[in-house]
Image (spheres, coloured by chain):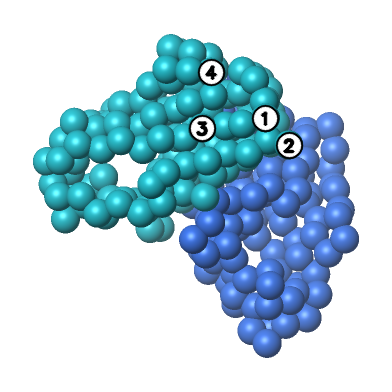
């Protein structure tokens, strides 16, 4: 089955700097790659996703890139703000299978 | 609009006691339903998912079970809790059977087994 590896497990950045979180997946048939943000004591929420027919997608300060050949995808957050502090999860799936999540990255933005 | 409700929010149970966590979804029909467990440092582990009433797929062998008695109701149960069952349990739903669609999570249930 699918295996998703996520790095780093913790990340601290100064406010205004960029943050990058990287994930790799094992199943070349996977074609959907979402990113979720989980704030303390709450359920995760989708922040951006990308499908295998797209190499990059951007939404304001966040962007996701996908390299299908290398089987890795990344989340980029620019101009980080304290409210970006949270746990971020990447995930991967293919048709008719549930999402498989990475182990998460705890991002701390220091003011 | 669609909403998902999960309860109880927190639970402290002794080892060997039973468990029942309940999840309901409103505002949609025939959703796919999921139970995930989040343990420290282990990310989101899929426990069960269901594509319809009475249809349950188990991802991890354990002493937990799931049931879907109604279209928008998903229950996670155990007859005898273990210490290792402690964690943050999340119910989620999605619309697409293909798996390639957004998951909407509940607020979670924190279970502590003593």
Q: Position of residue B20 (x, y in %)?
A: 30, 35
Dot 2 corresponds to which residue? Answer: B1
Q: Residues within 10 Å of mark 1 (few under 14, many from 20)?
A: few
Dot 1 corresponds to which residue? Answer: B27
Q: CA distance from mark 1 to mark 3?
A: 10 Å
Q: Is residue B27 left or right of residue B37?
A: right
Q: Quadrant of the N terminus of chain B?
A: top right
Rendered cyan, the chain in question is B
Kindly give the residue lying farthest to the bottom in the view shown.
A111
Rendered blue, the chain in question is A
Q: CA distance from mark 1 to mark 4?
A: 12 Å
**Which residue does the image show at 38% across and 58% down from the upper left?**
B40
Q: Residues within 10 Å of mark 4 (few under 14, many from 20)?
A: some
The tag earlier along the polypeptide, 3 or 2, is 2
Q: CA distance from mark 3 to mark 4?
A: 9 Å
Seen in the picture, residue B48 relative to A13 is either above or below; the reply is above
């Amino acid at each position: 089955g699918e295996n998703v590896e996520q790095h780093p497990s913790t990340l601290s950045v100064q406010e205004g700097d960029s943050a990058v979180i990287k994930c790799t997946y094992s199943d070349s048939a996977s074609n959907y790659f979402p990113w979720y943000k989980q704030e303390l004591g709450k359920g995760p929420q989708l922040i951006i996703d990308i499908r295998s027919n797209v190499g990059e997608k951007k939404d304001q300060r966040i962007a996701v890139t996908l390299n299908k050949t290398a089987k890795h995808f990344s989340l980029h957050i620019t101009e980080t703000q304290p409210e970006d502090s949270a746990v971020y999860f990447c995930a991967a799936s293919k048709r008719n299978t549930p999402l498989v999540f990475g182990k998460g990255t705890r991002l701390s933005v220091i003011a | 609009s669609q909403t998902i409700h999960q309860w109880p929010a927190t639970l402290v149970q002794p080892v060997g006691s039973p468990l029942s966590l309940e999840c309901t979804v409103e505002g949609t029909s025939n959703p796919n339903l999921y139970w995930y467990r989040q343990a420290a440092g282990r990310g989101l582990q899929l426990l069960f998912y269901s594509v319809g009433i009475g249809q349950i797929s188990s991802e991890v062998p354990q002493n937990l079970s799931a049931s879907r008695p109604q279209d928008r109701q998903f229950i996670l149960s155990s007859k005898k809790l273990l210490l290792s069952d402690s964690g943050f349990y999340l119910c989620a739903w999605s619309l697409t059977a293909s798996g390639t669609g957004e998951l909407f999570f509940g607020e979670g249930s924190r279970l502590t087994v003593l």
